[in-house]
Image (tube, helix red, strand yellow):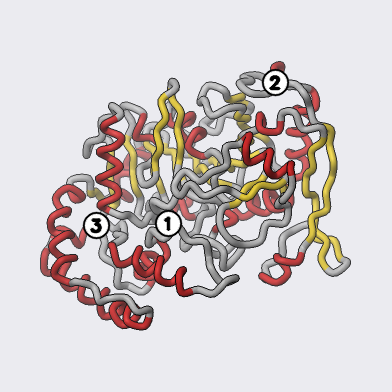
Amino acid sequence: MANVVVVGAQWGDEGKGKIVDWLSERADVIARFQGGHNAGHTLVIDGKVYKLHALPSGVVRGGKLSVIGNGVVLDPWHLLSEIETIRGQGVEITPETLMIAENTPLILPFHGELDRAREEAASKGTKIGTTGRGIGPCYEDKVGRRVIRVADLSDDATLEARVDRALQHHDPMRKGLGVEPIDRDALIAKLKAIAPEILKFAAPVWKVLNEKRKAGKRILFEGAQGALLDIDFGTYPFVTSSNVIAGQAATGTGIGPGGIDYVLGIVKAYTTRVGEGPFPTELDDDDGQRLGERGHEFGTTTGRKRRCGWFDACLVRQTCATSGVNGISLTKLDVLDGFKELKICVGYELDGEILDYLPTAADQQARVRPVYETMDGWDETTEGARSWADLPANAIKYVRRVEELIDCPVALLSTSPEREDTILVTDPFAD
């Protein structure tokens, strides 16, 4: 059976939640492989809205195994709170339906405190636009070999030693930022109190996933954020602190690269971004305002207004290449209904030269100017369309031109937040 990786192919907020939910009905396992609770997925099922941050999107589907992989950084208190919220909406979550990798790093209170203190201390122009939830500092501790992992909760002596090592690093840094030292005993007490609730979900996820794969089960790998926020291939330094591209599905779960059969990139029919950083096609006019209002462009996690702009084919072509995307899911096509004309970025002008990719240097990213191709819009509605026959001719032309420019076919087309309003072109789970 095919195993599918779903990645955002822009700056996040592309509608991954709906697509993962749509695909998860036919998957046996849904595995989250990176990011933290700074990500937000909104699912609309039979008119009921679920907002997920740490939990994999598959938890709302009965009979599925949901997995939090080691590539994720996990706030244990937030996780338990989210579990209770989702349970309150009638979803059953047990150790049989949810597993957490034993080597998953834990986001602790001091990570969020450091995140916020740094952002407050940053001068204008150097702020990253972090959500302040401690994701970055936790990833730093992971690569610095001082993070506390899920397995550490099972032994008091190990836990205390891990905390001491972390404090040796964090307390001097906090002092420099004018923040009080960490209360060691209070932190250890909090961790010991929560340990039994977290450990009941702990498992050797790498082993479980490989066994499932050998048994012919379908595995759906779910990423957070978008490939343009990747720590290596994103618009650095305005990026997240983990790898977001599809290759992270292997290292973030332990499945190995041979376990990935199909990569589906999620792409909006226009472009949005939250927070700071370059955005070549950003619109500060009525069209940008209209995109934001029609697309309800406010962050699921932060509520922050998203920056909006025309579709950038250059950027999506890049992310399709770095993630090895086999097909895209084009979402929010209906937001473009009623525009007289639409623009697509087909290149960049930089110092008199035309580029077909976004350069790596930050100063050049800030200076590029989009080169646009203009297409006719459509007056008819695409909202709720479930077949090509339901789409206006100009909408089909727009989709086909997007395919040509990004050098990747459309596998799915989404025309509303409802999971049923989806046009299937190519089945990612096909053998």
**SS under mark 2:** helix
**Disc nearest the viewer among 1 and 3:** 3
**SS under mark 3:** helix
Asked which quadrant contains residue 354, the reply is: bottom right
Mark 3, residue position: 150
The kind of residue on which mark 3 rests is Val
Q: CA distance from mark 2 to mark 1?
A: 38 Å
| Residue plotted at (76% across, 27% down) | 396
Residues under numbered marks 1 and 3 in contact, where contact means CB atoms less than 8 Å apart: no
| Residue plotted at (33% across, 43% down) | 67
Query: Label 3: how many residues lie within 10 Å, few (<14), some (14-19) or many (20+)?
Result: many
Looking at the image, residue 299 sits to the left or right of residue 134; the answer is right
| Residue plotted at (48% across, 61% down) | 130
Mark 2, residue position: 388
- Seen from this angle, which residue lies furthest right? 352
* Residue 406 at least partly seen: no
Residue 64 vs 255, above or below: the answer is above
| Res 251 label | 1
Q: Position of residue 244 (x, y in %)?
A: 51, 55
The kind of residue on which mark 1 rests is Thr
- Identify the mark nearer the N-term, 2 or 1: 1
Looking at the image, residue 120 sits to the left or right of residue 306; the answer is left
Camera-nearest residue between 219 and 244: 244
Query: Label 2: how many residues lie within 10 Å, few (<14), some (14-19) or many (20+)?
Result: some
* Residue 387 at least partly seen: yes
- Seen from this angle, which residue lies furthest top? 389
| Res 327 label | none
Q: CA distance from mark 3 to mark 2?
A: 47 Å
